[in-house]
Amino acid sequence: MNWLNELYKSQQREPKKDLERSLVEAIFRVYDRFPRIGLRERIGQQDMSLDITDAYINGRNAMIEAGVGIGKSFGYLIPSLLINQMSQQPIIIATSSIQLSEQIHKDLRVIGSRLGFTTVRSVVGKGMGQYACRSRAAELSRPDDPNSSLSALAQRVLDYEIDERADIKGGISDAEWSNVSVNDCTFERCPHKNACLFYDMRAKLNAKAHEIDFIIVNQDLLIRDLMKKKEGTRSIISERPALIVIDEAHNLEAKVRDARTLEFTFRGIFRILDTTVQLLTKQSGDKSLLSQSKFIKRCVEGIFTQINADLLHHAKQDSDRIKVSEIKGIPLKQVANDLKDLSLRLSILTSRHEREIDDAFEAINGLITLLNVFAGIEDNYLLWASNSLRAAMISICPKDISQFLKYTLFNGKTSVILTSATLCQGGETLEEQYSYLTQSLGYKGDFMDRKSSPFDYTNHAMMYISSKVPHYHHEQREVYLEAAYQEMVQLCNLTQGRTIVLFSAKDDMKFIHKKLISGTSDYTWAVHVQKEGSSQDGVIAEFRESKGVLLSTGVFWEGVNIEGPDLSQVIVFRLPFPVPSDPIYEYKAAVTENPFTEVFVPDMLLRLRQGTGRLIRSETDLGVFSILDSRLSAAAKKNYREQVLETLPFKKVTEDFSVLKKFVQKKGI
């Protein structure tokens, strides 16, 4: 640790030029030690660390595409450890999933220990919905009926068997977990706070700069913190980070939209109003607040009556987002004014329950925005309705999120590093290659050279594009699915299972799963399907053990790391184009000259590149990447075919199954 102590002391006494030299020298010294500490330097990793160091020293932001296999997490953790040591300020690392957050936490412990950092104080921050709430569980526990599933779940929470959703082996449905997860936390007032992982985590997230070294959160939590700081309410994460690293940054736009989407249910609004009135009447004793709340509730009931009618007529399935018709017969402006009165009262309220007041203030202001959107006063939001957990939900989302990020994240106060294996599109200059995400995010900063994957895609992999499956049309969906099923089974038989099938539509996955388990004798491999919930470790373990076929959507397009012959093929069932009728993409399309080439193709390519990254995970991996979408075939003559082929890493591409078969046999896949 002597050299680290010297580095810290140099920061106290040396001017910027010497500081830059000291930090760069420290990076080289770390990589020189790799062979002695059992680590292997990878192509591009050291360059990535130096890029981040340069950005920090010069107070700049940096966007870095780091290809699969360069050791991206060590690439940013190494300079982060040194910067934290020098500055004595925390490093914030934001990821796109809980699984990745926990993996980075493990990587931090590994690299920190091997480099001689004796104590690295770190915390993994997750959303409240991932934690069990003993206060809510106590309300649900029924000693007289211990055999009911809900009572049994509540009792396990009370018995400290379950602290987080991940503690439940085999997973749990969203609906069941929502009964016992943290919701509207009472923080200091909760009698269970001393044994609550959520309460402990939130305290560490907001620790003083010298009390914590690394704060690892999901992107949702980082964005929520930026929102709170912008609004002037109590922040969630430490105020003075030395550096912010955003991993899997290709997801940032969607995460910002999700975080800035306000969702309202009938029960949720009533709970907000009850909490607000309770907080205010405790201090003021003003009984008129009750009648004011009753009036707002009656109006809310009328709004949801109309929303339910819209859903009944226009929503074909629960995931559909539908347009909301004009709200009639409700005094929207009067309701908004009453809510503004409650907001004003909360803003001047003094109490030891500061967090509860902040949460209520934020929720009431969200309701005011919703009423203004309904009334046409606020036109900078998108509005839609959907069914969630069998209840109507109204959602609003800002149309443009780039300005928000430009002024809250990329403002120059703290250097921000954006990294992912898939940040770029085609283009001659770096600016052109990074342009789609730059525009979407409002990014201001430097573009670093792309760190290409060191894996040998030329000799170790082949891409197969099916020309046999007919183009997808909703009216002839089953014809397409039947043909795609036959092609999929043939491909899975070729690699004797060992295949992950990536779907972009859950309905397609359900159709294929039902057909596979219907007793057919077309195959001998085991069939697995992803589980509901956040953790997929169980189904991945089952898949690896059986060498079978795993059907998946969503989370499996990225972040899944299966090395070796357990995974020999990835099949993309359909090109992952976004849904044109989705309110967000409908808006993005409306503000561009050529929506297909400027929005839909770039978005599809980002997702497709993520799916590609599931196949080759080590220098020795061999595999096949198959696409069952004949729109990409040469005969279809789609203008985006060349762009896809140029962007993906595969050099061997065929539409001939016999050529693919020879490749598989030759390589012993």
Image (spheres, rainbow, N blue to C red):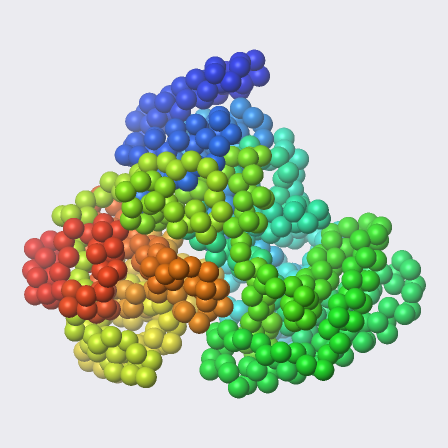
Q: Residue at x 88, y 61 (%)?
A: 282
Q: Is residue 390 left or right of residue 641?
A: right
Q: How many marks?
A: 0
Residue 343 lies, with reference to residue 24, above or below; the image says: below
Residue drawn 54% across the image and 18% down it: 11
Residue 359 position in % (x across, y down): 71, 56
Q: Which residue is at 26% across, 51% downward?
A: 647
Considering the image in quadrants, where does the C terminus appear? bottom left
Quarter residue 72 falls in: top left
Q: Position of residue 618 (x, y in %)?
A: 25, 45
Q: Nearer the viewer, residue 281 or 166?
A: 281
Q: Quadrant of residue 581?
A: bottom left
Can residue 213 be seen in this snapshot? no
Q: Residue 552: name its quadrant.
A: bottom left
Q: Return the residue nearer the eye: 595 or 425.
A: 595
Question: Could you tell whether 610 is left or right of 210 in the image?
Answer: left
Q: Residue at x 45, y 64 (%)?
A: 590
**As displayed, is residue 81 above or below residue 563?**
above
Q: In x, y percent, where is residue 410?
A: 53, 41
In the displayed structure, 557 sits above or below 393; it is: above
Residue 67 appears in the figure: yes
